[in-house]
Image: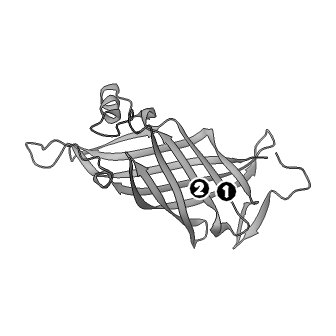
């Protein structure tokens, strides 16, 4: 918690943003989700239940940084057999590669409360650049006296770029699992110290 005399927010480019400091993703208020095509006709949605992130907000907000770690075994699509297959070596290989990692490499202001967070995503030991489209949702103080801010982010990756190439051809044409995966993140971050 911060002292009552310390500023917890500031104005920047017409936005009220958090004061510089270290913020951690609130485990109780986050969703790290994804959407993938199934059999060329529908979508499967899922999420990773166990994810952590550290957000370092700097004096210049465009120099801020994010690191995140997602536990591969925490994948959940609400279907046990599919989840087991996704944890297997044919997909995430959660035993050999227990985490998916993200490290930011830059922040660009877009318009209003929209930003692009450039970074490197590592899945199954393969690292590729990704750009997250981020929407800053605002700052506040929880009933427990914690300084917080909210955000949402999304991007789309080609899973085959990360070595996730398992698939089955369909008799009717196409494949069982689409290559493109949409990543959807929502959360609150809590100031530390």
Residue at 64% across, 67% down: 63
Q: Nearer the viewer, residue 97 or 35?
A: 97
Residue 158 vs 13, above or below: the answer is: above
Near mark 1 (Cα within 10 A), the count class, few <14, some 14-19 or many ≥20, is some
In which quadrant will I find the N terminus? Answer: top right
Residue at 66% across, 46% down: 24
Q: Of label 2 and label 1, which has the lower sequence position?
A: 1
On the image, the x and y values in percent for residue 9 come to 78, 60
Which numbered tag is attached to residue 85?
none
Identify the secondary structure beneath mark 2.
strand
Residue at 37% across, 45% down: 124
Q: Nearer the viewer, residue 76 or 91?
A: 91
Q: Is residue 8 left or right of residue 43?
A: right
Q: Are marks 2 and 1 in contact (CB under 8 Å)?
A: yes
Residue 79 vs 90, above or below: the answer is: above
Q: Choose top left, top right, bottom left or bottom right for residue 33.
A: top left
Residue labelled with disc 1 = 56
Q: Nearer the viewer, residue 158 or 112?
A: 158
Disc 2/disc 1 C-alpha distance (Å)? 6 Å
Q: Nearer the viewer, residue 57 or 146?
A: 57
On the image, the x and y values in percent for residue 52 come to 57, 42
Residue labelled with disc 2 = 66
Q: Is residue 151 left or right of residue 43?
A: right
On the image, the x and y values in percent for residue 17 come to 71, 62
Q: Choose top left, top right, bottom left or bottom right for residue 127.
A: bottom left
């Amino acid at each position: 918690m911060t002292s009552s005399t310390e500023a917890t927010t500031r104005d920047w480019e017409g936005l009220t943003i958090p004061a510089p400091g270290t913020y951690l993703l609130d485990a109780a208020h986050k969703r790290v989700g994804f959407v993938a095509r199934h059999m060329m006709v529908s979508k499967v949605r899922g999420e990773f239940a166990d994810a952590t992130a550290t957000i370092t907000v700097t004096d210049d907000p465009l120099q801020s940084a994010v690191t995140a770690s997602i536990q591969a075994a925490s994948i959940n699509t609400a279907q046990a057999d599919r989840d087991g297959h996704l944890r297997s070596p044919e997909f995430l290989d959660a035993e050999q590669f227990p985490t998916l990692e993200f490290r930011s490499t830059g922040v660009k202001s877009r318009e209003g409360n929209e930003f692009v967070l450039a970074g490197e995503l590592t899945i199954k030991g393969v690292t590729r650049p990704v750009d997250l489209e981020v929407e800053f949702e605002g700052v506040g103080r929880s009933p427990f006296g914690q300084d917080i801010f909210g955000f949402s982010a999304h991007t789309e990756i080609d899973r085959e770029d990360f070595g996730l190439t398992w698939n089955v051809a369909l008799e009717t044409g196409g494949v069982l699992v689409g290559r493109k995966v949409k990543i959807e993140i929502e959360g609150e971050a809590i100031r530390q110290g």
